[in-house]
Amino acid sequence: MRWLSGLSAPDRALAPLPERLGLACVAVTVADGGAITLRYTGQDRVTLFATDWVAGRLEDLQEVVGEGPGWDAHEGDEAVSAGLGDTTAWPTFVPAAWQELGSVWVCAAPIRAGGAQVGVLTLYWATSPQIEPDLVAIQFLADVVGAALYRSPEADLAKQVPWASRAGIHQATQVVAAQLAVPSEDALALLRAHAFTSGKALNAVAETVLTHELTFSPTRASSSEGA
């Protein structure tokens, strides 16, 4: 606990707070990587930090398909853990993740702060761990993350959040909503569907909308959706 507190201490010379927290959780659990995502099911969902491409892709796939360990942790408000090669719990997420990432083991726990759930901590192991992750310990880590983020001054935290990548998704959502005259929720669902069928990250699909490489307007929908 002292080591974790030291790593997450407010020292700007080390790294942004979300990065220090994420790396500390990975080190404590001897995981291969992890991510911290806030506002898990909202349109303003944002991944504060992902250790590597695998952790980032796990978050992106779960957002796109709307299921996975992170969603279960969020909806059930408790930590969950499973090897992707050993479960049938997520019939859309597992095949997609398996195809890209192989049989990783994933654990997710809700992040709580100020008496409310604010996000999800996700950890992964490239191979099945010799000892199954301790869900109680990982939930404790998630609560520590929540407490640290909750105590961080809002202005300081805002500077450390990768809003720019999410801003592109918001902008693309509004573009698609205007093209098809549909609510923003439906427009975002279309972007997620296109990301899933094309195998691209959601922010990459958003970029193609903003650069006009992809359009969902009725006159070009058929040709663009095949792009």
Image (spheres, rainbow, N blue to C red):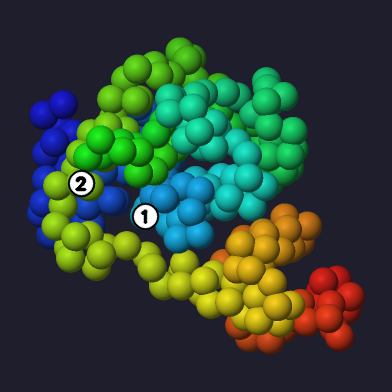
Can the viewer see residue 227 in this picture? Answer: yes
Can the viewer see residue 205 in this picture? Answer: no
Tell me which residue sits at (58%, 50%) in the image. 63
x, y percent for residue 149: 22, 47
Q: Nearer the viewer, residue 166 or 15?
A: 166
The amino acid sitting under disc 1 is Leu
Q: Along the horizontal axis of the image, is 203 left or right of 35?
A: right
Label placed on residue 69: none
The residue carrying mark 1 is 48
Identify the element where label 2 is drawn. Answer: helix
Label 1 and label 2: CA atoms lie apart by 14 Å
The amino acid sitting under disc 2 is Tyr
x, y percent for residue 93: 68, 39
What quarter of the picture does the C terminus occupy?
A: bottom right
The residue carrying mark 2 is 150
Disc nearer the start of the sequence (1/2): 1
Q: Nearer the viewer, residue 193 or 133?
A: 193
Q: Quadrant of residue 116?
A: top left
